[in-house]
Image (cartoon, rainbow, N blue to C red):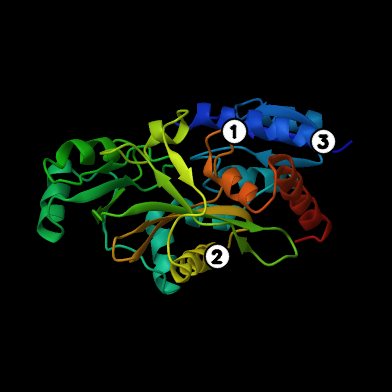
Amino acid sequence: MTLVAVLMGGPSAEAEVSRNSAAEVAAGLERAGYRTERVELDTQAVDRLRELAPDAVFPALHGPPGEDGTVQGFLEILGLPYVGSGVHGSAVAMDKSIAKAVFARADLPIAKDLLFPAGTGPAEAEARVLAEFGDRVVIKPLSQGSAIGVTPIANGGDLVPGLTAALALGDGILVEPYVLGREITVGVLDLHGQAPRPFPVIEIRTAADQWYDFTNRYAAGGSDHVIPAPMPEALTEALQRIAVDAHVALGLRDLSRADFIVTDADEIVLLEVNTLPGMTPTSLYPDGARAIGIEFEALMDQLVQSALTRARDGA
C-alpha cells in the first residue's frame, strides 16, 4: 500500500491551521486507499522521513518555511516525490512583490503598490503612503499567508498601527490602494501531464463591515462560499483565464488558488496566488473541486498520483 507522509505544523504563524489541513488530507488519503503518517515539521522531521521512507510527501503546510520553497528544497535533497510546486515557483509566489512583478510582465491586472523593506520606520512609510495613495489603503506583509498581518483601512485613518504590525513580521511590506469590491477566488488543478484547468469562480461573503481575515477563513460560519459566483459569463471566463495564466506565469504545478477583488464596475484586480491552499473543513479549494464533481478523497488521490507520475517521469 502506498505510504504518504503528510507534513504539518512547523514554526509558521499558521502552524495550527496546517495541522487541521493535515488531519483532513490524511483522512482523505486513507479513504482513497493510502497509508498515511503525519510528520511534524520540526528538528526530528529529517530522521522521521528517512525512517518512514514514504512513497510521496504531501506538504499540508501554510506560510514560511512550508510554502516559500524551503521545505520543497529539503524534499528535493531527500529525493522524495511531493505534492505541489517546486522550489522556484513556491519562492516566487510567496513573495508578494516578486509575484506582482511576474504578473505585470504577463499583463495581468494588479493594483499599484509601494514596497518597504524590513527595517523601514512606520512614520517614514506612512509619509510616503499618504503622499502616493492617501489613507485608504491595504497593508500587507511580503511573505505571510492566511491574511496574517494584513490591515485594510477602508475608511482611512491612522496608518501607523497597521504599518507597525506588518513591519514587525520582518520581511518587509507592500501597501496598495484600497479597492472596494467583491472577494473572489479561483482554484487551479494542474496534474502532471495534463493542461491546467480552473475550478468554478467562488465569491466569498462575510458579515457586513467584515472581510475574509484569518478568523473568518477558519471559523465555522465565518464566511459563505457562493459557487458559482453570480456574474456575467464573460467575467467568469476572464477570472478563470487569469487564474490559469497566473499559475503558469509563476511556474506552479499540481494546485493553486488565485484571489481577486472584483469591483461593482466588473474591474478585476488579482491580489495573490496561494501555492498550498488550505484543506480544512472551511477551505475554499476543496469546495471548488467538489463543484466540478471531484470529491475530497479523489482530489487527494489525484494530487498524490501527479507527484508520483512526475517522479517516475524524472520531471
Mark 3 and mark 1: Cα distance apart in space: 17 Å
Q: Is residue 101 visible?
A: yes
- State whether residue 276 is above or below residue 36: below
Asked if residue 128 lies left or right of residue 86, the reply is left
Mark 3 and mark 2: Cα distance apart in space: 29 Å
- Could you say which is closer to the camera, residue 298 or residue 249? 298
Residue in the image at 27% along x and 59% along y: 113
Residue 174 percent location from the top left of the image: 29, 52
- Could you say which is closer to the camera, residue 311 or residue 215? 215
- State whether residue 70 is above or below residue 265: above
Badge 1 element: helix
Q: Is residue 11 visible?
A: no
Mark 1 and mark 2: Cα distance apart in space: 24 Å
**Residue with the mark numbered 2:** 244
Viewport quadrant of the C terminus: bottom right
- The circle drawn on residue 21 is 1
Asked if residue 216 lies left or right of residue 298, the reply is left
Q: Tell me if mark 3 has few (under 14), some (14-19) or many (20+) residues whose alpha carbon lies within 10 angstroms of its own.
A: some
**Residue with the mark numbered 3:** 34
For the residues labelled 1 and 2, say whether their Cβ atoms are less than 8 Å apart.
no
For the residues labelled 3 and 2, say whether their Cβ atoms are less than 8 Å apart.
no
- State whether residue 53 is above or below residue 94: above
Amino acid under disc 2: Val
Q: Quadrant of residue 32?
A: top right
Residue 209 percent location from the top left of the image: 25, 39
Amino acid under disc 3: Tyr
Asked if residue 261 lies left or right of residue 156, the reply is right
Residue 2 percent location from the top left of the image: 85, 38
Badge 3 element: loop
